[in-house]
């Protein structure tokens, strides 16, 4: 009798729970491998766009002092005063040379010579500076204050002496007399040379030009003080602070930072353990062993 054919197909052998099947995992990236390393984790602050150089602020332009506007009328007045002062200095030097041999009065006249030279040199320097700057600005007004103060003080002293001697010039007529003792007549015989009397007009003219030097530079001194005050007021402007924003700290040279993570001991978990039966040899039709409860296993 032929064997009864069975329509039941043999089930596939059950995989043992003790040996899980080999699973195929996708390849891990470098960042995932770094995260799985025990005790280290990638710093979240390193996430974001790639490293870029910090944008530098453009260099600030060098601050220049503000230009104080100067009225055209005052500029023309100063240039005119400097020009007239040069003429007065030239005339004064000529008068000083003519009076140099007039004994006592000649010494007083020579005292005005350095004053004329300093005033003329300063006037020429101011005009040359204006010409080089296309008549827009001259020497700093602070320098004008110092030099003009020195000149008008010196002119006041020298001009005062010259004016005093000019008022009493007739008292110096004795300087023109040349007296000699005559033994035959038994008295002094005096002759007048008129060297001092003839130069009285020149001495008075020298006194006038010295006083003019005082007047011109006193006006320039007052104007320079006003210009200096305006310049100082323009420079005392409020200071503004410019903030460039918060500082930017870019990522490190490696692109990431590893921060150590400290893990405590694992806590116990109440998870029942299953009885994994060892694999049995057979044709796969044997019934699976029943799972033994945990309470009976430890009884």
Image (spheres, grey):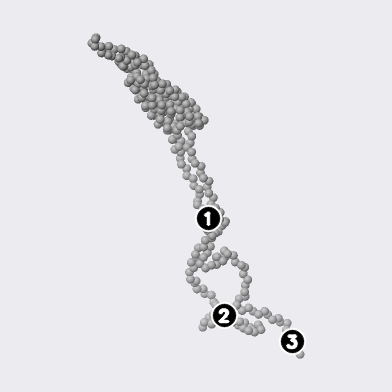
Q: Mark 2 or mark 3: which comes first in sequence?
A: 3
Cβ atoms under marks 1 and 2 closer than 8 Å? no
Other residues around mark 1 within 10 Å, as few (<14) / some (14–19) / many (≥20): some
To which residue does mark 2 refer? 275
Cβ atoms under marks 2 and 3 closer than 8 Å? no
Other residues around mark 2 within 10 Å, as few (<14) / some (14–19) / many (≥20): some
In percent of width and height, residue 221 lies at: 41, 28
Q: Of helix, strand and loop, which one carries label 3?
A: loop
Q: Mark 1 or mark 3: which comes first in sequence?
A: 3
- The answer to which of 218 and 93 lies nearer the viewer is 93
Residue 4 visible in this rendered orientation of the protein = yes
How far, Cα to Cα, is label 1 from label 3?
81 Å
Work out which residue is located at the far left of the displayed protein and give it: 186
Q: Mark 1 or mark 2: which comes first in sequence?
A: 1
How far, Cα to Cα, is label 1 from label 2?
55 Å
Name the residue at 44% across, 32% down.
Answer: 141
To which residue does mark 3 refer? 4
Work out which residue is located at the far top of the displayed protein and give it: 185
Name the residue at 59% across, 81% down.
Answer: 277
In percent of width and height, residue 62 lies at: 49, 41
Q: Quadrant of the N terminus?
A: bottom right
- The answer to which of 204 and 292 lies nearer the viewer is 204
How far, Cα to Cα, is label 2 from label 3?
38 Å
To which residue does mark 1 refer? 250
Name the residue at 50% across, 29% down.
Answer: 131
Residue 70 visible in this rendered orientation of the protein = no
Name the residue at 57% across, 63% down.
Answer: 31
- The answer to which of 164 and 297 lies nearer the viewer is 164
Image-quadrant location for residue 143: top left
């Amino acid at each position: 009798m032929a064997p009864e054919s069975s329509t039941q197909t043999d089930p596939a052998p059950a995989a043992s729970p003790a040996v899980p099947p080999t699973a195929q995992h996708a390849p891990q990236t470098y960042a995932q491998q770094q995260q799985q390393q025990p005790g280290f984790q990638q710093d979240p602050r390193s996430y974001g766009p790639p490293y870029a150089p910090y944008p530098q602020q453009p260099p600030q332009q060098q601050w220049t002092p503000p230009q104080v506007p100067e009225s055209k009328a005052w500029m023309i007045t100063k240039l005119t005063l400097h020009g007239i002062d040069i003429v007065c200095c030239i005339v004064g030097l000529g008068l000083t040379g003519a009076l140099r041999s007039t004994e006592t009065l000649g010494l007083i006249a020579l005292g005005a010579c350095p004053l004329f030279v300093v005033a003329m040199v300063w006037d020429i320097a101011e005009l040359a500076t204006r010409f080089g700057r296309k008549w827009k600005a001259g020497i700093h007004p602070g320098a004008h204050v110092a030099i003009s103060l020195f000149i008008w003080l010196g002119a006041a002293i020298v001009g005062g002496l010259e004016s005093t001697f000019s008022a009493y010039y007739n008292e110096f007529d004795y300087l023109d007399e040349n007296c000699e003792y005559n033994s035959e007549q038994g008295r002094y015989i005096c002759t007048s040379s008129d060297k001092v009397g003839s130069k009285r007009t020149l001495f008075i003219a020298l006194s006038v030009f010295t006083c003019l030097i005082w007047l011109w530079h006193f006006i320039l001194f007052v104007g320079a003080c006003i210009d200096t005050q305006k310049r100082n007021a323009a420079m005392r402007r409020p200071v503004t602070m410019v903030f460039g924003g918060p500082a930017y700290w870019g990522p490190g040279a490696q692109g990431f930072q590893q921060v150590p993570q400290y893990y405590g001991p694992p806590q116990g978990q109440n998870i029942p353990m299953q009885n994994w039966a060892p694999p049995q040899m057979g044709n796969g039709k044997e019934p699976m062993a029943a799972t033994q409860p945990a309470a009976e296993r430890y009884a």
